[in-house]
Amino acid sequence: MPSANDLFDVRDKVVLITGGGTGIGRGMAEGFARRGARVVIASRSEDHLRPVAESLQAEGLQVAWQVLDVRKADDVQRVVGLALERFGRLDVLINNAAASFACPVERLSLNAWSTIVAIDLTGVFLMAKVAGEAMIRQGQGGRIINISSTAGVFGLPHFAHYASAKAGVIVFTRTLAMEWAHHGILVNCVAPGPIETPGATDATWPTEDLRRRIRDSVALRRLGTVEEILGPCLFLSSRASGFVTGQTLVVDGCTVATAIHNETEAGRTA
Ligand code: NAP
């Protein structure tokens, strides 16, 4: 019987994390690198990526970064290419990059809808496709973890664009898990509830009142932490989850109500 350390070991795995310069993605980059994984982080802003990569490199850890817009096929090819060139392989993709803002449907433009779907759903497809092709060529399986949201499970007023894209991520996950099972590629999804990050604070609970109401909608009566998303992702990247594929793990402290935003508040944040 393997020890708990062996079961959850991610040492030397090559892990590509989109949106790895901020919030949950940053926490995962730090968490994986400090457990011995070789990490590539990528997003649109060098200002987000460079400081994270450099501070981890200063600790003697193996981290590379690359500017990436998940909507651009060339960028996606380049970032997977970087993982292969720098570290020789790719074991885990964490599709974490996403964008959102509050807006009621009657005020949501086609352009706004399309932008969010392009980043949050099509970007996940593009990354998974290119990373998966590399894993298939390697012939040793792999792991893909898509970060969805409780908005994609339960819906979320004034986030129809985001919730719809995140729901698509869940079905994409399950479908891809079936298609790539025979390659040994396990595809799973993590659907966080409210997690304390600057990005989510700006987009989802910009006022103290909203924050309190969101916190009160969680059975555990608090927001989650970045570390509480890292844990499930370590599990889904390691031997411990070898018979888990196609699943969505909801990590939300048991959210009991999602109808939080009223029209006045959405008007302020849209
Ligand atoms: P965040 O800090 O805003 O993370 C979003 C990341 O996506 C940023 O690093 C951003 O980096 C990157 N990004 C945005 N558009 C991109 C694009 N077109 N191409 C490449 N990268 C792009 O927010 P977070 O709270 O950590 O969220 C991380 C993930 O968790 C997201 O998928 C989010 O939907 C999900 N989630 C979060 C919560 C929560 O309460 N925090 C709840 C449910 C789900 P750049 O600006 O540098 O591009």
Image: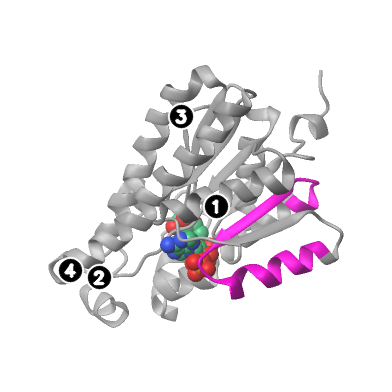
Q: Which mark is residue 246?
A: 3
Q: Position of residue 149 (x, y in %)?
A: 42, 51
Percent of width and height locating residue 158 = 25, 65
Q: Is residue 243 left or right of residue 44?
A: right
Would residue 48 be counted in the magenta stretch? Answer: yes
Q: Residues within 10 Å of mark 1 (few under 14, many from 20)?
A: some
Q: Depth-wise, is mark 3 or mark 4 nearer the camera?
A: 4
Q: Which mark is residue 103?
A: 2
Mark 4 surroundings: few (<14), some (14-19) or many (≥20) residues within 10 A: few
Front residue of this view, candidates 89 and 183: 89
Three-letter residue code for mark 4:
Ser
Q: Marks 2 and 1: in contact by CB < 8 Å?
A: no
Is label 2 within 8 A of ligand 1 (CB to nearest ligand atom)?
Answer: no
CA–CA distance between discs 3 and 4?
33 Å
Mark 3 and mark 2: Cα distance apart in space: 31 Å
Determine which residue is flagged by label 4. 109
Please state which amino acid type lies under the numbered disc 3.
Gly
Q: Are marks 1 and 3 in contact (CB under 8 Å)?
A: no
Q: Earlier in the sequence, mark 4 or mark 1?
A: 1
Tell me whether circle 4 and circle 1 mark residues in contact (CB < 8 Å): no
**Residue 126, position as x, y percentages in the image:** 42, 45
Q: Earlier in the sequence, mark 4 or mark 2?
A: 2
Gap in angstroms between the C-alphas marked 4 and 2: 9 Å
Q: What's the residue at 30%, 62% (across, down)?
A: 115
Helix, strand or loop under label 4:
loop
On screen, residue 216 above or below 76: below
Residue occupied by mark 1 = 78
Q: Is residue 109 above or below residue 185?
A: below
Q: Secondary structure at mark 3?
A: loop
Considering only order in the chain, which callout, 3 or 1, is on the residue closer to the N terminus?
A: 1
Please give the range of residues in magenta.
33-57
Counting other residues with Cα less than 10 Å from the Cα at mark 2, is it few (<14), some (14-19), or many (20 or more)? many
